[in-house]
Amino acid sequence: MNRVIQIIVLYKLMSQEGSTMDLILHLLLLAVTIFIIAKSMPGVHVEGFGTALVVAIVYGLINLVLGSLLKLLAIPFIFITAGLFLFVINAFLLWLTDQLLEDFEIENMGTTFVAAFFITIADTLLSWVF
């Protein structure tokens, strides 16, 4: 794990801001996160790492398009709840991803909220790095 962190830090020092490689690394690490969540949470199922990568891509696209709109419309709720409403939006986006992909399944809404919580944290951290 330390070797991976060293490679990422070295890459960041050598790369340009906002490059395509940043996007690829972000999606790959998000896929790793989704794969780990699926293997560690009993209610989340993916067929394999390839499916986790597809989930990361679809979730990212849905988050970019629909998530941005929902966050804009929900600004008052986000403000009132000190940002906690973002987890509701992200859980909805994860549920939507689940509905669109056959090889990705989340069994119930409670599991969706927990998985969305971990994916949101990982995605936020990855956004800071990449």
Image: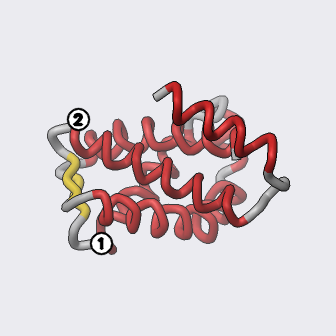
| Residue pointed to by mark 1 | 101
Which mark's residue is nearer the viewer, 1 or 2? 2
Please name whichever residue, 84 or 31, is drawn nearer the observer in this view of the structure: 31
Is residue 128 in view from this perspective? no
Residue drawn at x 40%, y 62% as measured from the top left? 53
Is residue 7 in view from this perspective? yes
| Residue pointed to by mark 2 | 40
On the image, the x and y values in percent for residue 105 come to 22, 59
Q: What element carries label 1?
A: loop
Residue drawn at x 44%, y 37% as measured from the top left? 117
Residue type beneath disc 1: Leu
Residue drawn at x 35%, y 41% as measured from the top left? 115
Q: Is residue 43 left or right of residue 114?
A: left
Question: Against 98, is 81 above or below?
Answer: above
In three-dimensional space, the C-alpha distance between marks 1 and 2, rounded to whole angstroms, equals 20 Å
On the image, the x and y values in percent for residue 98 come to 31, 63
